[in-house]
């Protein structure tokens, strides 16, 4: 009994201690979580600051580029560059002369200014460059552009603010890279010998009125211009610095190239420009996919853990940026100091809480253990089958309620045991009944299975017969396909023969007939002239027939290439009207356009123009009297534009309307017909409309005229 009581007490005390330890652990974890929150807060805000500073740097460089671009558009600059190019073009051995001058230039002692150099450094353009760079130096207090010069298209200097290392720049790698760029190019930071400064080269390409390369304007941008942006951003008065980093004395800032070379640093220890960042640190700073802040051991001797936050240059507007990396660093011992102090306080309070909780657990466990042991003994009796046992707990708390519930449970168990015996007998009878029913169902299921197997055998025989038929049909289709392919080859051969064997001699006939008309007109009688005209007219008609047959064949074979573009129906109609001006005036018929406010359609320009031409030409041809109008109109119908050509001509009989789009069909097919034609124009029109996913139809009354309609999809730029 004493052993059991001791066990319960031990567990209760252990439970209270576990709760106390959990409270201590939660406090410790909360402190650790606070450290993570501080890391995230300072890291993300530092990333935002670095991103903002880099954006300002990119904007500054872009604005310098923009200023130089505006200057390069100066009319005087362009004229002087053009004059230089024209002078060089007059030379016989341009490259030889350039190489000779370049050799003399390079061989001149350092610090020596030859008369030729002086001429290039004192001409009108050089003086203007010097005034402009001097203005920047006076405005900002340092030399923004230590050096600037202009070359012609041959890559030689024509004006400079000072002596450069070479006369010929075209053989330099930076020059070739810059010229390959359209517009402008910005180099990486490097030491410029001519200006004795660390700088970026800004190269503006110059072009003549035709858009051809004419030369370059190069300005050396002092890196001090970029560093000034960082110095201003680190001033205490800046909002982001005051809000986030006012108390962080260990914060440092480093600007790196994309290769990890230091351009600028705020660290107190002296640094060398272009010194390399350790490879291990650079591997984490250089990647764009990794987290933008992290904790790592400092790269200087004796440094502990530091929080690194980084951002990458992404450029601004047309300037793509140089991939620079801006790093903001904090010592973790400084930023985590409040968290460490809080964690120590939590540990002290937790130890006090554990001691107090253990004492309270001992006192409570003694009052609980006696009642629990009585419940345990009664439960043991019930498991042995003694359902008459009861417990006596006099307390009025939850343990007393538990004792009453236990006694009620014992009474209900005693009552349910009698009911369970009776229910077991009823269940045995029900199982026997269900078993008999199941046997009957199994017999019926076996019969069904036999029937299904018979059906499957019948289906298999049917499937075998279908397989034979499918195989026969497949062989027949293959033969038909081979025949169709052979017929297509014959058609292509026919088109080739027609194109070469008919068009070639026909072109010669037309040319010779035209020559006879022009050269022998004075020597021919009127009858001979008429005969020659008839020959020329019929030859041209035959050529048109051949062209239309070939055009239709190309459409059928899908070999015609369509250049689908935005088309203005009104503009096309104006072009067709101009093309038919002589023909319509000859017949004294006016062509009217009714197409205002109609949206553009999508289609092939030449094909749609031919479609309009064929329909309008037919309308003029078949108009019956002088002074009549042929109307070419258009209107929008949902997502399509419907164009119509209306005449007041002879009309088309009802029985001919279904056939007018057939090949070689003519309403009047008699030998004495009044109107000529090949019978292929409308067939070509129909094919063109079908390729453009439109429709074509007509309305006509004999003696009153005919209206042809065709629809085309409206142009949609997103298509």
Image (cartoon, rainbow, N blue to C red):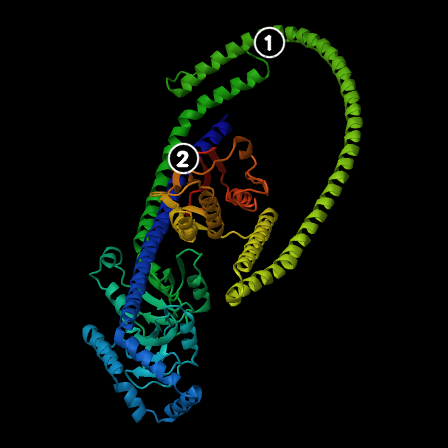
Q: Is residue 133 above or below residue 419?
A: below
Discs 2, 1 touching: Cβ within 8 Å: no
Image position of 55 with respect to 631: above or below: below
Count of marks, rendered view: 2
Q: Position of residue 665 (x, y in %)?
A: 58, 40
Mark 2 or mark 1: name the one nearer the start of the chain. 2
Quadrant hosting residue 361: top left
Answer above or below: position of 298 versus 686: below
Percent position of residue 446, x then y: 77, 17
Q: Nearer the viewer, residue 424 or 570?
A: 570
List x then y, in percent, for residue 152: 36, 80
**Dot 2, how many residues are within 10 Å of its Cα: few (below 14), some (14-19), or many (20+)?**
some
Q: Could one spot residue 154 in this view of the protein?
A: yes
Percent coordinates x, y for residue 471 in the rendering: 77, 37
Q: Secondary structure at mark 2?
A: helix
Looking at the image, residue 358 lies above or below residue 233 = above
Left or right: where does residue 271 sit relative to residue 526?
left
Q: Secondary structure at mark 1?
A: helix
Q: Which residue is mark 1?
A: 420
Q: Answer few, some or many: residues within 10 Å of disc 1's Cα (few below 14, many 20 plus, some between 14 and 19).
A: few
Q: Residue at x 51, y 43 (%)?
A: 689
Q: Tell me the number on the disc at residue 16.
A: 2
> Horizontally, is 312 left or right of 80 in the view?
right
Q: In percent of the image, x 46 and y 50: which residue is there?
A: 609
Left or right of residue 476: residue 216: left
- The answer to whether residue 113 of the structure is visible from this angle is no
């Amino acid at each position: 009994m004493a052993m059991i009581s001791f066990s319960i007490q031990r567990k209760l005390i252990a439970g209270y201690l576990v709760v106390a330890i959990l409270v201590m652990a939660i406090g410790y974890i909360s402190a650790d979580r606070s450290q993570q929150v501080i890391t995230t807060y300072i890291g993300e805000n530092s990333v935002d600051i670095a991103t903002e500073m880099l954006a300002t740097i990119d904007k500054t460089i872009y604005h310098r580029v923009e200023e130089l671009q505006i200057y390069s558009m100066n009319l005087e600059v362009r004229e002087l560059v053009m004059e230089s190019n024209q002078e060089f073009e007059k030379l016989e051995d341009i490259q030889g002369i350039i190489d000779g001058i370049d050799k003399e230039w390079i061989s001149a002692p350092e610090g020596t200014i030859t008369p030729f150099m002086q001429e290039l450094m004192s001409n009108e353009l050089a003086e203007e460059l010097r005034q402009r760079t001097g203005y920047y130096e006076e405005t900002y207090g340092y030399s923004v552009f230590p050096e600037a010069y202009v070359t012609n298209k041959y890559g030689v200097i024509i004006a400079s603010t000072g002596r450069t290392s070479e006369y010929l720049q075209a053989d330099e790698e930076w020059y070739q890279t810059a010229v390959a760029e359209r517009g402008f190019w910005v180099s990486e930071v490097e030491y410029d010998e001519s200006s004795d400064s660390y700088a970026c080269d800004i190269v503006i390409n110059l072009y003549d009125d035709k858009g051809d390369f004419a030369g370059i304007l190069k300005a050396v941008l002092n890196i001090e211009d970029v560093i000034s942006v960082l110095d201003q951003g680190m001033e205490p008065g800046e909002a982001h610095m005051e809000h986030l980093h006012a108390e962080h004395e260990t914060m440092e800032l480093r600007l790196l190239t994309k290769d990890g070379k230091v351009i600028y640093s705020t660290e107190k220890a002296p640094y060398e420009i272009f010194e390399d960042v350790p490879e291990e640190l650079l591997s984490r700073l250089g990647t764009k996919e990794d987290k933008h802040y992290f904790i790592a051991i400092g790269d200087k001797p004796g440094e502990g853990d530091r929080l690194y936050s980084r951002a990458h240059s992404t450029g601004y507007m047309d300037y793509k940026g140089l991939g620079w990396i801006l790093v903001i660093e904090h010592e973790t011992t400084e930023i985590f100091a409040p968290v460490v102090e809080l964690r120590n306080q939590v540990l002290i309070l937790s130890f006090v809480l554990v001691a107090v909780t253990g004492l309270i657990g001992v006192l409570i466990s003694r009052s609980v253990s006696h009642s629990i042991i009585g419940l345990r003994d009664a439960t043991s009796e019930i498991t042995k089958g003694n359902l008459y046992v009861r417990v006596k707990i006099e307390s009025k708390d939850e343990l007393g309620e538990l004792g009453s519930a236990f006694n009620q449970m014992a009474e209900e168990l005693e009552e349910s045991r009698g009911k369970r015996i009776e229910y077991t007998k009823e269940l045995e009878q029900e199982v026997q009944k269900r078993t008999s029913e199941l046997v009957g169902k199994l017999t019926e299921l076996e019969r069904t299975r036999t029937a299904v197997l018979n059906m499957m055998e019948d289906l298999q025989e049917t499937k075998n017969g279908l397989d034979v038929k499918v195989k026969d049909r497949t062989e027949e289709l293959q033969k038909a396909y081979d025949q169709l392919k052979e017929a297509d080859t014959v058609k292509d051969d026919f088109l080739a023969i027609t194109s070469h064997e008919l068009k070639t001699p026909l072109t010669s006939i037309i040319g010779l007939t035209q020559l006879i008309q022009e050269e022998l007109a004075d020597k021919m009688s009127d009858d001979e002239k008429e005969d020659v005209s008839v020959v020329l007219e019929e030859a041209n008609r035959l050529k048109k027939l051949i062209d239309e047959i070939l055009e239709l064949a190309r459409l059928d074979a899908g070999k015609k290439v369509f250049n689908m573009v935005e088309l203005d129906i009104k503009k096309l109609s104006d072009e067709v009207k101009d093309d038919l001006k002589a023909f319509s005036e000859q017949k004294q018929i006016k062509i009217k356009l009714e197409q205002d406010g109609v949206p553009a359609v999508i289609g092939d320009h030449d094909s749609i123009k031919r479609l309009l031409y064929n329909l309008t030409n037919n309308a003029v041809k078949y108009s019956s009297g002088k002074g009549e109008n042929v109307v070419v109109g258009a209107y929008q119908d949902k997502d399509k534009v419907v164009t119509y050509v209306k005449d007041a001509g002879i009309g088309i009989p009802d029985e001919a309307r279904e056939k007018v789009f057939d090949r070689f069909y003519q309403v009047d097919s008699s030998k004495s017909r009044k109107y000529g034609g090949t019978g292929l124009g409308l067939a070509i029109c129909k094919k063109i409309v079908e390729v453009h996913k439109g429709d074509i139809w007509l309305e006509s009354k004999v003696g009153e005229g005919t209206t042809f309609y065709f629809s085309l999809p409206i142009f949609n730029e997103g298509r």
